[in-house]
């Protein structure tokens, strides 16, 4: 009999974003753009992590709307639901189930050290709930359920992926090889896009009205206005030079321009040599509009076809459910849970 070589198995990428608001240029450049670029090489799972959203109080109707809108934007950004698994986290119960188990292998001290927990607790002092604290455990479950090799994220999530590795390692140490140890992949430029108005703060999606956040759904005129008003620096030289220590606003705009055009910092410096911020800022705005316009238009078309989006959700949930059961069963068996009688 003729020998057929086994098909080479692709490595796996997993990532997700919580639907706490409208996706921003930061979510796109820090995460989604990288996902699309890795799709060819990796078997891909992308999740709308709605369960992570309720660590702060959200309006239920708004959460549903944001989740569906986010799914549409995933597709509009170039993630093909036929080629990768796109799904909603709360549709796949294995995430919550594995999260409980992993929580028992995560130390209180480890969770207390998470920067995001400290920042979010400071912002929501009247609601420092258990979910906010154990958020990274659920994130570890999201990742480990799919036998993930790489997790493309922005800089702010690197610490959570490191913790995920520590949890997996600890579990493997007790029960033998169970989980792969995933690693974070960060984009070369755009791993931390800052607010256009406060270049010391990350551009974030939870405040849609923040003039420093560029939303993927912003029309061109709004994008242009935000870039024209972007904070630069009050230094006397007023030149476009990459100096993240002393010229934070300009460095941020240069990172955005580099990420959307593929140009290097020295090419950008040459391009705007002697031209000043009055030319530079609208040029960045134009370049961003050129990238976001087709995405926004495609998302608009998709959102008008709810039947199609529902079918993507259903197919994604089924594929994710099937893929996640294997690891969950293995974990349940290892920790000593009785098999469910048939
Ligand atoms: N400004 C950013 N620059 C680079 N990457 C970013 N990401 C988010 N903002 C930037 C990356 O996009 C993904 C978003 O995941 P998330 O929504 O689950 O987490 P987050 O980091 O908490 O995002 P936000 O926008 O700041 O949400 P809120 O305001 O709700 O807390 C991650 O890969 C992140 O690194």
Image (cartoon, grey):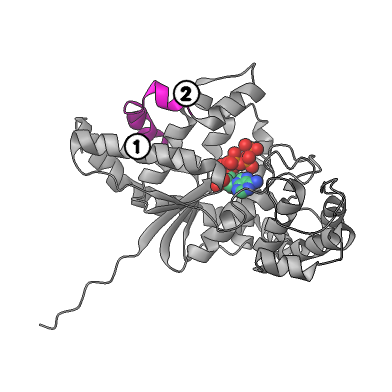
- The residue positioned farthest toward the front in the image shown: 236
- Numbered badge on residue 186: none
Residue 122: x, y in percent? 63, 22
Disc 2 designates what residue?
Answer: 112
Secondary structure at badge 2 equals helix
Residue that appears at 89% across and 59% down: 278
Residue that appears at 60% across and 57% down: 189
Residue 177 left/right relative to 280: left
Residue that appears at 35% across and 65% down: 10
Residue 284 left/right relative to 101: right
Q: Would you say the magenta stretch is mainly helix, strand or loop? A: helix
Magenta stretch: give its range: 94-113
Disc 1 designates what residue?
Answer: 166
Residue 119, picture quadrant? top right
Secondary structure at badge 1 equals helix
Residue 154: x, y in percent? 56, 48
Residue 304, picture quadrant? bottom right
């Amino acid at each position: 009999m003729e020998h057929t070589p086994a098909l080479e198995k692709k490595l796996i990428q997993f990532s997700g974003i919580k639907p706490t608001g409208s996706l921003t240029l930061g979510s796109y450049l820090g995460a989604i753009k990288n996902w699309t670029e890795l799709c060819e090489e990796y078997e891909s799972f992308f999740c709308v992590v709605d369960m992570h959203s309720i660590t702060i109080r959200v309006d239920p109707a708004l959460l549903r709307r944001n989740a569906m809108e986010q799914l549409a934007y995933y597709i509009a950004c170039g993630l093909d639901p036929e080629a990768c698994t796109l799904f909603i986290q709360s549709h796949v119960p294995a995430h919550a189930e594995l999260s409980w188990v992993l929580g028992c292998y995560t130390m209180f001290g480890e969770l207390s050290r998470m920067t995001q927990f400290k920042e979010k607790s400071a912002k929501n002092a009247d609601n420092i709930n258990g979910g906010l604290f154990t958020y990274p455990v659920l994130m570890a479950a999201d990742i480990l359920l799919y036998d993930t090799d790489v997790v493309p994220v922005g800089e702010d999530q690197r610490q959570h992926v490191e913790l995920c590795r520590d949890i997996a390692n600890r579990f493997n140490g007790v029960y033998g090889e169970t989980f792969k140890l995933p690693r974070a992949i960060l984009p070369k430029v755009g791993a931390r896009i800052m607010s256009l108005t406060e270049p010391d703060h990350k551009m974030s999606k939870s405040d849609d009205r923040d003039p420093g956040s560029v939303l993927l759904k912003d029309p061109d005129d709004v994008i242009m206005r935000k870039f024209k008003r972007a904070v630069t620096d009050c230094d006397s030289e007023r030149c476009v030079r990459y100096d993240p220590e002393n010229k934070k606003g300009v460095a941020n705009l240069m990172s955005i321009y580099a990420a959307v055009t593929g140009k290097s910092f020295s090419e950008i410096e040459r391009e705007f040599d002697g031209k000043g911020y009055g030319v530079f800022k609208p040029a960045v705005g134009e370049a961003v509009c050129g990238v976001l316009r087709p995405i926004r238009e495609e998302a608009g078309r998709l959102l008008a076809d709810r039947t199609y989006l529902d079918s993507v959700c259903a197919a994604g949930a089924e594929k994710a459910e099937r893929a996640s059961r294997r690891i969950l069963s293995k974990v349940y068996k290892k920790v000593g849970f009785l098999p469910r009688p048939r």
